[in-house]
C-alpha cells in the first residue's frame, strides 16, 4: 500500500465499479431494448448464466475467447427467441414465462457446463491504461477490459439510434402502442420477438464477461443475480441506454464499496451499502409513480407499468 | 361468455340428451384444467426425453429412477415431503395476491426477514420459558415481519401506484442485504466463524418432526395454510370481494368494495405466510438464521403458484410433485452419472411448457358448453 493510503478506497471503488459493472451494462442495455418494444424479459438471469457457460466452453475448445463471446450471443438470441415466441400467444404471462426460462436456462447451463468446471479458458484481452504509473494498484485499476469499452460505446450508439434511426422509431412505436404500430403496417409481435432476441444476445455477452474475464472461471455460482437485477436497472435508468450505463456503474460501485471498506478495516455495516442501489431504485419508483397515470418515460405497452 | 349464451330463449334440447346435458357441461368445465395440465406435462416430459436421448441416456431408466428417488420408498417420500413444505407457504405468497390480479415475485425477501425476526425473537426467551411459547412467539414474529414486508408492497401499489412486481423484487434484494447485515453484525453469534449465524436455538426448542415421520411440522403448517387460504378465497365474503376486484378493479370500486383494504390485507397475509416459511426454516431446519435462508424457496414458490393456477388447494399436489423431482436429483446423479442439474432441466422444461399451455384455455370447443351445438 505504498504511496496510496487513504486513496485506496476510492480507487478500489472505481476499479471495482468498472470491473463489476460490465455485465450490468450489457444485461441492462439488452433489457432496455426488449422493454422499449413493450415486453419484459425476466429470464435474462438464465440467459446470462447460459451465455457464461457457452462462452467458457467454446473458448476452452477453440482457444479463442472471442469465438466464445460470439457463441454466447447466438445462444442468448435463441433464448430470447423462445421467450418472444411463447409470449406472442394470448393469455401467456410474460413475467411468469421469464421466471420459468430463468430456471430452464440455469438448469441447462449447469447440466451442460459440468465438464467445463475444471479446464482453463483463455481470458478476454484488456487494455492497460495505467502504464504511466509505477503503483501496481493504479495499474491494475486501470486495466480496463475491451468489453467495458464496447459496452460504453454501445450505450451511446443505442441512445442515438433510439432517437435518430428508423429501427429506433419502429421499436418505440411498437413499445408505446400496438395499435399505432399496426396502423403503420408493422407487426408488433415480430418486432418484439426480434427485440427480445437482441436483448438475450446482449445479456449473454454480460455472462461471457463473467466467465472469461472477471471472475474469469466457470462454476455454478458465477452470477450473483445480475440478470434478475437488469429489470430494476432499466427502470432506474428510465429506459435510456446512457442512463443504463451510468446506473450499471453505480450498481457496480455500490457492490465494490463493501470489499473496499473491508480492506481498510471497516468490517461492519457495509452490507447495507449493497442495498443502496435497490433502495434508490425503489425511492425513484415511489416518487415517480402515481395511482392515476402510468410511469413517466415508460413504454406505453409495457405490462409492468399499466 | 359468448353472445349465444345470452340469448334468453334457448331452442329446446332433445329429449334423450336433456338429462345428460347438465352433467356433461359440469364435466366439461372441470375437465378443461385437468386435460390441459396433463397434456402440458406429457409434452414437457416428451421434450425432456428427447433431450436425455440426445445426451445418450435412456429416458425410461431416468423416469424409473425419478419415481424411486421421489416416491419409491418411505424414505424418499419423506424426503420429498420435506422439500415440499417450504414451497407450500411461499407459493401462497404468490397465489393470494394473484387472485387480486397482483404479480408478487419477492417472497424470498419475506422468507429471509421472517427467519431473522423469528431467530431474534427467540433469543431473549430461550432458557426462561417453555419451548412451545418460544415457538409460538417465533411464528408470530416471522409472520408479522413477512406481513409488513409484503404488505408494504400492497400499500405502495394501492396508494402510490408503484408496480408490485418490481417493488417486491427490489425489496427482496433489500431484505437479503438486511439479513446479511443482522447475521454478520448485531445478531451474530461470535462462535459462528465460517458461516455467520445467529445464536443457535437449543435442541429442545427446535420445532420437531411429525410423530412417526422424519418430516418436520412445517408440512402440516403449510397444508393447513393452503386449506385456510382456500376457504378464505372460496367461502368468505372477503375472498369473494377479492375475486371481483381481481377481475375488474373499476367494477369493484363502483360496487363500493374496499379495494385498498383488500389489497393491503391480501398482500400482508401472503407475506406472513412467506415469513412463516422463514420461521419454520430457522426453527426446524437451520436452528439459526443464516445465509441458507435465501435458498430460492421464494422463487420456486412463484412457479408452484402459477402451475397451481393460484388455487391454494392445487398448490399442495404441485409442491409435493416438485419436491419429489427435487429429491430424486441425488439418486440420478449416483446411478446414471448425470449431473444433479438434470432435475433443474426437467423442472424448467415443465414450467415453460405448462405456462405456455395457458394459451389453450377456452380454445377447445369440447370444454366450452356455451359453444356446443343445440341439438334440435
Image: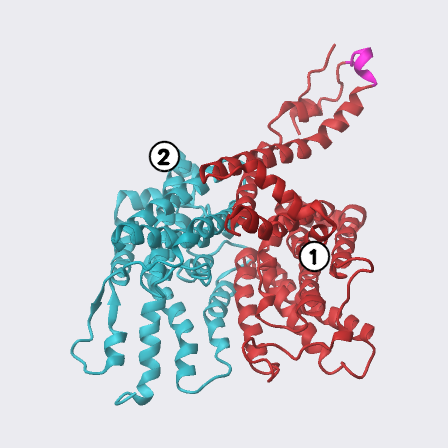
Chain colours: A cyan, B red
In the rendered view, does B259 fall on the left or right side of A288?
Answer: right
Q: From the viewer's perspective, is residue B19 above or below residue A283?
A: above
The question of residue B18 being in magenta is answered with yes
Q: Nearer the viewer, residue A165 or B52?
A: B52
Q: Is residue B32 above or below residue B122?
A: above
Label 2 close to label 1 by CB (< 8 Å): no
Q: Residue at x 65, y 53 (%)?
A: B91
Which element is circle 1 on?
helix
Residue lying furthest top: B376
Chain of residue at mark 1: B
Question: Residue A109 appears at what percent x and percent y?
Answer: 44, 51
Question: How many numbered markers are drawn?
Answer: 2
The image quadrant that residue B263 belongs to is: bottom right
| Residue A107 appears in view | yes
Position of B268 with respect to B190 (left or right) is right
Q: Is residue B180 magenta?
A: no
One can see residue B254 in this view:
no
Magenta highlight range: B12-19
User: For the point 63% across and 52% down, which residue is it?
Assistant: B327
Identify the residue under disc 2.
Answer: A186
Image x and y of residue B349, in percent: 53, 42
Name the front one of labels 2 and 1: 1
Picture disc at residue B82 = 1
Q: What is the secondary structure assignment of the residue under circle 2?
A: loop
User: For residue A181, which numbered disc appears in the image?
Assistant: none
From mark 2 to mark 1, how far is it between C-alphas?
52 Å
> A133 above or below B150?
below
- Letter of the chain that mark 2 sits on in the rendering: A
Residue at the far left: name it.
A132
Residue A152: percent from left, percent from top: 27, 61
Give x and y (percent) for residue B190. 59, 85
Amino acid at each position: 500500500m505504498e504511496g496510496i493510503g487513504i486513496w485506496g478506497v476510492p480507487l478500489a471503488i472505481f476499479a471495482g465499479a468498472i470491473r463489476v459493472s460490465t455485465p450490468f451494462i450489457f444485461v441492462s442495455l439488452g433489457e432496455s431494448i426488449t422493454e422499449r418494444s413493450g415486453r419484459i424479459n425476466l429470464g435474462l438471469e438464465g440467459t446470462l448464466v447460459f451465455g457464461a457457460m457457452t462462452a467458457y466452453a467454446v473458448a476452452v475448445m477453440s482457444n479463442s475467447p472471442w469465438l466464445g463471446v460470439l457463441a454466447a450471443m447466438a445462444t442468448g438470441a435463441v433464448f430470447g427467441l423462445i421467450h418472444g415466441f411463447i409470449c406472442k400467444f394470448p393469455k401467456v404471462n410474460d413475467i411468469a414465462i421469464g421466471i420459468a426460462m430463468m430456471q430452464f436456462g440455469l438448469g441447462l447451463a449447469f447440466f451442460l457446463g459440468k465438464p467445463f468446471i475444471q479446464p482453463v479458458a483463455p481470458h478476454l484481452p484488456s487494455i492497460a491504461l495505467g502504464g504511466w504509473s509505477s503503483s501496481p494498484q493504479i495499474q491494475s485499476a486501470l486495466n480496463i477490459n475491451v468489453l467495458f469499452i464496447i459496452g460504453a460505446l454501445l450505450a451511446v450508439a443505442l441512445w442515438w439510434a433510439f432517437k435518430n434511426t428508423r429501427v429506433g422509431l419502429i421499436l418505440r412505436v411498437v413499445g408505446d402502442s400496438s395499435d399505432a404500430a399496426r396502423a403503420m403496417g408493422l407487426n408488433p409481435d415480430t418486432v418484439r420477438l426480434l427485440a427480445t432476441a437482441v436483448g438475450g444476445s446482449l445479456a449473454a455477452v454480460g455472462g461471457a464477461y463473467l466467465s472469461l474475464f472477471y471472475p474469469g472461471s466457470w462454476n455454478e455460482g458465477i452470477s450473483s443475480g445480475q440478470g434478475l437485477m437488469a429489470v430494476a436497472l432499466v427502470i432506474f435508468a428510465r429506459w435510456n441506454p446512457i442512463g443504463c450505463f451510468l446506473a450499471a456503474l453505480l450498481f457496480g460501485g455500490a457492490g465494490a464499496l463493501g470489499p473496499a471498506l473491508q480492506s481498510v478495516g471497516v468490517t461492519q455495516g457495509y452490507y447495507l451499502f449493497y442495498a443502496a442501489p435497490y433502495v434508490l431504485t425503489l425511492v425513484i419508483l415511489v416518487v415517480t409513480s402515481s395511482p392515476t397515470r402510468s410511469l413517466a418515460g415508460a413504454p406505453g405497452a409495457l405490462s409492468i407499468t399499466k | 361468455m359468448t353472445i349465444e349464451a345470452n340469448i334468453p330463449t334457448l331452442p329446446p334440447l332433445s329429449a334423450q340428451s336433456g338429462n345428460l346435458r347438465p352433467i356433461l357441461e359440469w364435466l366439461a368445465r372441470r375437465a378443461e384444467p385437468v386435460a390441459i395440465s396433463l397434456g402440458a406435462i406429457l409434452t414437457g416430459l416428451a421434450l425432456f426425453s428427447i433431450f436425455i436421448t440426445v445426451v445418450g441416456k435412456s429416458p425410461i431408466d431416468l423416469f424409473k429412477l425419478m419415481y424411486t428417488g421421489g416416491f419409491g420408498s418411505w424414505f424418499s417420500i419423506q424426503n420429498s415431503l420435506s422439500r415440499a413444505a417450504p414451497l407450500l407457504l411461499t407459493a401462497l405468497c404468490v397465489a393470494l395476491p394473484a387472485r387480486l390480479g397482483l404479480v408478487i415475485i419477492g417472497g424470498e425477501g419475506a422468507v429471509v426477514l421472517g427467519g431473522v425476526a423469528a431467530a431474534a425473537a427467540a433469543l431473549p426467551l430461550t432458557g426462561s420459558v417453555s419451548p412451545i411459547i418460544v415457538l409460538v412467539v417465533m411464528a408470530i414474529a416471522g409472520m408479522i415481519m413477512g406481513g409488513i414486508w409484503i404488505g408494504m408492497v400492497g400499500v405502495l401499489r394501492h396508494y402510490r401506484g408503484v408496480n408490485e412486481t418490481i417493488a417486491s423484487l427490489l425489496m427482496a434484494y433489500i431484505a437479503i442485504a438486511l439479513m446479511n447485515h443482522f447475521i454478520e453484525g448485531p445478531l451474530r453469534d461470535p462462535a459462528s466463524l465460517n458461516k455467520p449465524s445467529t445464536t443457535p436455538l437449543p435442541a429442545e426448542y427446535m420445532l420437531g418432526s411429525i410423530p412417526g415421520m422424519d418430516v418436520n411440522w412445517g408440512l402440516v403448517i403449510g397444508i393447513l395454510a393452503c386449506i385456510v387460504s382456500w376457504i378464505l378465497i372460496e367461502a368468505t365474503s372477503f375472498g369473494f370481494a377479492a375475486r371481483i376486484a381481481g377481475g375488474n378493479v373499476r367494477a369493484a370500486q363502483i360496487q363500493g368494495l374496499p379495494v385498498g383494504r383488500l389489497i393491503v390485507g391480501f398482500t400482508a397475509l401472503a407475506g406472513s405466510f412467506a415469513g412463516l416459511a422463514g420461521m419454520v426454516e430457522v426453527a426446524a431446519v437451520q436452528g439459526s438464521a443464516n445465509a441458507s435462508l435465501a435458498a430460492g424457496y421464494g422463487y420456486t414458490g412463484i412457479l408452484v403458484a402459477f402451475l397451481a393456477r393460484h388455487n391454494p388447494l392445487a398448490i399442495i399436489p404441485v409442491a409435493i410433485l416438485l419436491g419429489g423431482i427435487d429429491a430424486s436429483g441425488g439418486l440420478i446423479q449416483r446411478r446414471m452419472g448425470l449431473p444433479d442439474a438434470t432435475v433443474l432441466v426437467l423442472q424448467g422444461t415443465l414450467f415453460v411448457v405448462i405456462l405456455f399451455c395457458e394459451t389453450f384455455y377456452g380454445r377447445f370447443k369440447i370444454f366450452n358448453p356455451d359453444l356446443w351445438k343445440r341439438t334440435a
